[in-house]
Amino acid sequence: MTFTLQGGRRIVVDATGRWAQRYSFGGTKTPQTLGGGLSEMQVTTSDGARGTAIYEVTGQWHHRYFPLPRGEKFPPDAYSPGEDERAR
């Protein structure tokens, strides 16, 4: 991932890690294999810094950032908006 700062300075971030906590859709008896969650990461930047980070991957129902869903009735009892409608 590359961050471009004000003034044009760029910092490249390389990371490796593992899926630490998946988001649950609740109400299901089987573990969810799809969806977002948190990953614990070891990061190194192009300017030599090293450290740890938490990386968040969001899923289809994070409507603030992704206005249209990618699936129907997911989770099973959810409302799926139409193509011209924002998720609620």
Image (cartoon, rainbow, N blue to C red):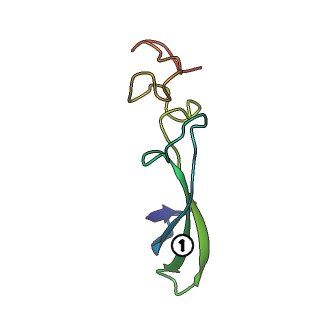
Rendered residue at 40%/22% (across/down): 72
Rendering coords of residue 70 (x, y %): 38, 30
Considering only vertical position in the picture, is 74 above or below 20?
above
Quarter of the rendering containing residue 2: bottom left
Query: Dot 1: what SS?
Result: strand
Rendered residue at 61%/37% (across/down): 26
Residue projecting furthest to the front? 29
Considering only vertical position in the picture, is 17 above or below 30?
below
Q: Name the image quarter holding the N terminus.
A: bottom left
Considering only vertical position in the picture, is 19 above or below 51?
above
The residue beneath circle 1 is 41
Rendered residue at 44%/27% (across/down): 69
Rendering coords of residue 68 (x, y %): 45, 25
Rendering coords of residue 65 (x, y %): 54, 36
Which amino acid lies under the numbered mark 1 shown in the image of this protein?
Met
Rendering coords of residue 77 (x, y %): 53, 21
Q: Residues within 10 Å of mark 1 (few under 14, many from 20)?
A: some
Which one is nearer the viewer's eye here, 10 or 1?
A: 1
Q: How many marks?
A: 1
